[in-house]
Amino acid sequence: MHFRSLLLLGFGASLVLSTSAFSAPPVAPAPASDVSSVVQVATKEQEAAKKKKKKTATNSKTKSNKKTASKPQTEAEKKAAKLKADKEKAAKEKLAKANAAKEKAAKAKAEREKKLAAQKAEREKKAAAAKVEREKKLAAQKVEREKLAAERAKAAEERKIRLAKEAEERKIAREKAAEERRIAREKALEERRMAAEAKAKAAEEQRLARIKAEQERQAQIAAAAEAARQAEISRLVSMEVVQTGNNTELRSEAAVQAAPQQTGLFANIFGGQQAIQKQSMLPETRALDAAMELKASKKPFKVRPEFVPTTVEFSGYPRGTIVIDTAAHYLYLVEGTNKARRYAIAVGKDGLQYKGTVKVGDKQEWPRWIPTKEMQAREPAKYGKYADGMPGGGANPLGARAIYLYQNGRDTHLRIHGTIAPETIGTDSSNGCFRMINEHVIDLYRRVPVGTEVVVL
């Protein structure tokens, strides 16, 4: 009973579907311009019919699977199959009509394209003829333009030549006029120059006459001054201390002020007025200095340029400090924050060099010399005969001045002093002291007070 109900239900559904398919109105033939639309619609309907057929077949198969496979086909199923076959036939006829319409549209399109190609060929032929005509016309115009351009170029060249000729003539005229003016100016200038030279010559002769007269006057003054100085030197040299040497301690009084203008040998070495200590020199000191100057004038010692006292950049020590660089053979007197006066020195031999800090404990002029006990023990033949001392003077190794170096209030037996062997400056040749050229140590002596700190590097 249940099986019969299902069979009737499937038959009724198939009948309804077939009726709806046959009840659709017939499709009118589409125009040639709508061939594509018709083909698309037909294709969609075929696809829908295939899907529906597949679905129906699936449903039928599902239902038939529920039934016994050996059951005979019913009248309703036959009718449904017939309806389906009719429907497929109608779809094929519809598709054939659509294909025919499509072919007709393609033929019409081919006709139109042929007609358009003929029209295009005609237009191209006319355009080519027009182009040829234009090219002929342009060629003729070009020839005409070239002819006119050639005529204008010829006229321009002729005008250019004419203008160049006129310009050259004007240039020659200007140069001639300028040359005449130049010659006139040079002539006038030469006349003025000759007049000025004559005037200058007269003025120069007058100036030279005045200079000559002044030089003669100065020469007379200098001769008188030199005669007076030589007389003073002779007087001082005749003093007994020059002949016997200095056996006392000479310490001239000093006052810090501007020294007077130097003359003679010292002026050449130290040059001009300097702010140093001016000493009221003792007669003995002045006599021995005069003897030294007289001797130096007869046999001068030429100081090497690098050994001449000079002001250099120097920093790191307080003003007034003496700094001795033994390796470089230089002594520096610090004069400011960034400068010092530099002197050349000789230093001790290897093993006899001192390094440290001391102070100026004493100063003497033309001092007596007593070799230290170490020096006498080291070289008795050389220094033993001076165990009682050597008077200060021209043969004394301490030279014109000696600055005595003390440490903690005691004499270190180290000296900054002059020398009788200036050629040793710049070498390691002393017994530990610091030698200087006599004129240089005199200059340093006047600048350094007792108590000055001395740093030996």
Image (cartoon, rainbow, N blue to C red):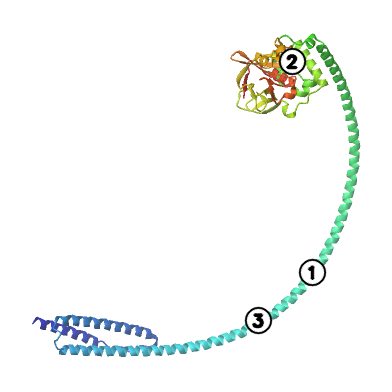
Query: Relative to 6, does residue 160 appear above or below in the rendering?
Result: above
What percent of the width, then of the height, locates residue 263?
79, 20
Q: What residue does disc 3 label?
A: 135
Q: Dot 1 lies on which element?
A: helix
Query: Relative to 150, does residue 409 appear above or below in the rendering?
Result: above
Q: What residue does disc 2 label?
A: 396
Please state which amino acid type lies under the numbered disc 3.
Glu
* Distance between the alpha carbons at the discs numbered 2 and 1: 104 Å
Q: Quadrant of residue 22?
A: bottom left
Is residue 88 left or right of 236 when viewed as pictured? left
Quadrant showing the N terminus: bottom left
* Distance between the alpha carbons at the discs numbered 3 and 1: 32 Å
Residue at 89% from the left image edge and 41% from the top image edge: 193
Please state which amino acid type lies under the numbered disc 2.
Asn
Instruction: Give the mark nearer the N terminus: 3 vs 1.
Output: 3
Residue 77 visible in the snapshot: yes
Residue at 80% from the left image edge and 9% from the top image edge: 240
Q: What residue does disc 1 label?
A: 157
